[in-house]
Every structure is written in C-alpha cells, then in structure tokens.
Image (tube, coloured by chain):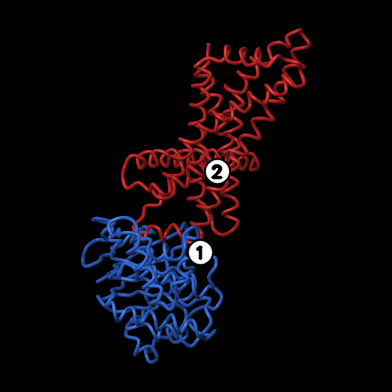
Amino acid sequence: MRWVAAFLAAIGRTVLQTLAMIGRLTLYALDTISHMVRPPFYLKELLQSLMNVGYFSLPVVGLTAIFTGGALALQIYAGGARFNAEAVVPQIVAIGMVRELGPVLVGLMVAARVTSSIAAEIATMKVTEQIDALVTLSTHPMKYLTVPRVLAGLLMVPLLVGIGDIIGVMGGYMVATRTLGFNPGTYLKNTVDFIETLDVVSSLVKGAAFGFIATLLGCYFGMHTGRGAQGVGRATKSAVEAAAILILATNFVLTSLFFSI
Amino acid sequence: MIELRDVHKAFGSNKVLRGINLSVARGTSLVIIGGSGTGKSVALKCILGLIRPDSGLITLDDMDVTKGDRDAFLARFGMLFQGGALFDSLPVWQNVAFRLMRGSLKRPKAEAREIAIEKLRRVGLKPEQADLFPAELSGGMQKRVGLARAIAAEPEIIFFDEPTSGLDPIMSGVINDLIREIVTEMGATAMTITHDMTSVRAIADNVAMLHDGVIKWTGPVSQLDNSGDPYLDQFIHGRAEGPIEAVR
C-alpha cells in the first residue's frame, strides 16, 4: 500500500512540476512579446542574432534538405512502383517537402544548432554572474538577451524553411532526373503546378512558430539554469528536448488547422 | 545612506538572513566579513534588487529601494563581482564602457572608448589591452577590468564582492590600494565583502561581521582587535576553536 502511495505521489509531483513549468514558460513568452514592442531596442544584438540564427544555419539546413529531398524521391518512386504510380514523384516530393518535411526538419535542425547554443551561452552567463552584472549596468536581460534572439528566430526561420523547401525539391529533382529517368522540364512543371499558395503559407507560418519556440526555449532554460557546469549541461539538454517535442506537437496542431477536412 | 532593517531571506528551508540591521553612512567604506555561506553576497544582492528579501526594509537616502525609478537607482551603483562577470563576447574596452554605450548615460562611441581607456589606465592596464577579449587576460587583469567597469560611470556607491579572492598577495595589495584610492578620490560610499583580513584593514572605515544570518558585531576598523566579541576574535585570528563551528 505504501509503495502504491509513493508511486502515485511521484506521478503527482511530476504532473505538478510540469504544469508549473508550463505556467512559467507561458508567462516568460508573454513577457518576451511585451518587451518586443517596448523600447529600448538593441539593434546591434538583433543583427548579430539574425546572422547567427539565419545565415550560419544555412549550411546545415541546405544539406539536410537536399539529402531528404533526394531520399524522398527514391522512396516515392520505389513505393509508387508497387501500384504503378511512379509518375507522382514530383508532386509527392513537393507536397512532402513544403508541407511537412521542410518546416519540421528545419525546425529540428534549428533546435539542435541554435537552441543548444543559446541555452548554453545564457546559462553560462547566469552561473558566472554576467546576467546580474547586466542588471547592475541598468540593462534588462530580457531586452538585451531574449528579445533579439527570439525576434531573430521569428524572422529568420521562415526564411530558412523557404530555402529548405526549395533545396529539398531540387534534391528530389536531381535524383529523379539523373537516376530515375524523369524529364527535367516535365518534373519542374508538375512540381510548380501542384503546389498551392496554402502549402507555401502553411510552411512559412510553421517556420515562424518553430523559430519562436526554438529560440524562446533556449533563452528560458538558459535563464533558469541550475548551478555550475552540471546546471549548464542540464539546461542545454532540457532546452533541446523541450524544443524538439514542442516543435513536433505544434506541427501537428498547425497541420490540423491548415489542412483539416 | 544605505540602511537595512530586519531583512530576512530564505532559500527553501535554508534561512540565510535572519533579520539583518545595518547602516552605511555616505562616503564611508564598510567591509562585511563572515564565514562562507553566511549570506554576505545575498545581503549585497538584496540591496541591488537582484534578490528579493522575504521581509524587512532596505532604504537608500530614506527611500525604499523597491520603489521609484529602477534605472535611476541602479545608475547610482557600480559593482565588482567576485569572478569579474565580464561579458566574454565583448572586448575589454566595451566591457568597461558598457554603461556609457547604452541607456540614459549613453555617449558617442569614441568618447566612451576614451573614458574606458582612461579607467583602464587608472587600474593599471595599458591602452593596448583595451582591444583584447576577457578570456585573453589573467585573473588579476580580469579583476582590474571589473574594477574599471564598476567605476566607469563614476557611481556614488560601489560594491566589491571578494575583490582579492584568487589573487596572489602582491596583486591583492594592488587591488586593495586601488579600491582605497578610488573610494577616497571619488568620495564614494563603498561596501566590500571579503575574507581577507589584510584587505579589511586596507579598505575599511567600518567593519560588520555577519554570522548565523545576523550582524554579530559592527564598529570602526580601529576597534577590530579589541572588540571583546568572541565571534569576531575567532574569525580575525582564524582559530578553529571558539563559538563559530569550524564544520558547518
């Protein structure tokens, strides 16, 4: 009986801690949004964050997208061959990349690259009292550290998703035209004809949402780190895990909203 | 004048401050001594608003520090952190001039750099070290950069958290002399936390000893050796036996 009570208490504690964290995260997100529209604005920090989140993520996003697009073309061709539907490769690659794989893979890559680096950097600043130093120098850490990074995520990740979508489709195009015998002109025409405005809009909206989540969680876990190197490590790990899960959950919700019948 | 009245602060079940009463007169230098983990840094951070006390009142010139314009309040302070707390993404001069490059004290970049280099010279660093990054400096140099940053905007009140910890005796002496000079020349009010009794005698006008979350003794530095307080005597002579338990 005591064992059952202890088990239920452990579950209860975990649920309460999770709910408390969701509450704190929600308040942190609202606070971040409110600071985005109130001066002072730190333009130099914003430009640095735009470069870090956007420009420096391009190689990893490009490589991920091109290999995924190529693999997708091979899979669809092989799978489609089972019921004589090999010709749908351009359409399925396009819809798969633009609606789902492009935004999700870019979101996860940003979570791996950017969320981890933001969480580790801010957590280190916290444990070395740099955040306290910012406050004593009359600089609000939310405005100086969080707002530029989250704004950069919000603005740059949709751009990365758009670029990832194009590169992914081109990966499929290269594989299809060079190894699967598709006609280049017909492949491109089928791709362009099949994609609808809603597909592109949903992709970019997902990108903005994922960028917001990835950067916000990096900042949140960095600011709420425990002590020492172990605290920094835990904050980084928790930030990436939470960002990845929340990106996938948000993807499901947004897909349901955009494409529910 | 800074005044703390019956300030309490606990972290979970750990009651760090159990009713601190302390006052620091304008233009004087108070050094707070006490064992590790007795809440000295917490007391300083409560004054600055970095930590919110559970109860009690902290005033600056008879004004509650939790009320009023926070930016104007913080503009009156400078702080040297224990580990320096330099921003490692910025070069040395931008660390020193941080406050002068943004906010209400903002100056043109060239002027801010000039002031930073002057402050660096004041703490014994060369102009060519201004463009290095903090990671390229030794511990003693980082401490001096932290000191230059604390005084860059010529604040009325300066806090020094363990200014000589981790430094060799010669560098400690240099930092102590610098602090005393700066406080005297600028006419600033200073609060310093240290375990180093040489620093206490070099820096302090008054000394307060914090133990078990309360101020056990306070008085002028000249009375340090004949206070008659057993806690203070044990601490300043570094004895294992006495009312303070060596293993806490």
Residue at left 47%, top 77%? B164
Q: Nearer the viewer, residue A260 or B103?
A: B103
Chain letter of the residue beneath label 2 in the structure image: A
Q: Percent from the top left, x then y, of residue A92?
A: 65, 16
Q: Check the image and report above or below for A95 versus A114.
A: above
Q: Amino acid at mark 2?
A: Thr
Q: Colour of chain B?
A: blue
Q: Amino acid at mark 1?
A: Phe
Residue at left 28%, top 65%? B76
Total marks placed: 2
Q: Percent from the top left, x then y, of residue B147?
A: 41, 72
Q: Residue furthest top?
A: A84
Which is closer to the viewer, label 1 or label 2?
A: 1
Q: Secondary structure at mark 2?
A: helix
Q: Residue furthest bottom?
A: B226
Mark 2: give few (<14), some (14-19) or many (20+) Cα within 10 Å.
many
Q: Percent from the top left, x then y, of residue B205?
A: 32, 83
Which residue lies under the disc numbered 1?
B133
Q: Which label belongs to residue B225?
A: none
Q: Colour of chain A?
A: red
Question: How far apart in space, not on screen, are marks 1 and 2 (Cα)?
Answer: 25 Å
Task: Name which quarter of the figure residue A255 lies in.
Answer: top right
Q: Check the image and report above or below for A166 versus B116.
A: above
Q: Residue furthest front?
A: A185
Q: Check the image and report above or below for B177 versus A170.
A: below
Which residue lies under the disc numbered 2?
A115
Q: Nearer the viewer, residue B124 or B62?
A: B124
Q: Percent from the top left, x then y, of residue A22?
A: 48, 38
Residue at left 69%, top 30%? A67
Task: Name which quarter of the figure residue B30 lies in.
Answer: bottom left
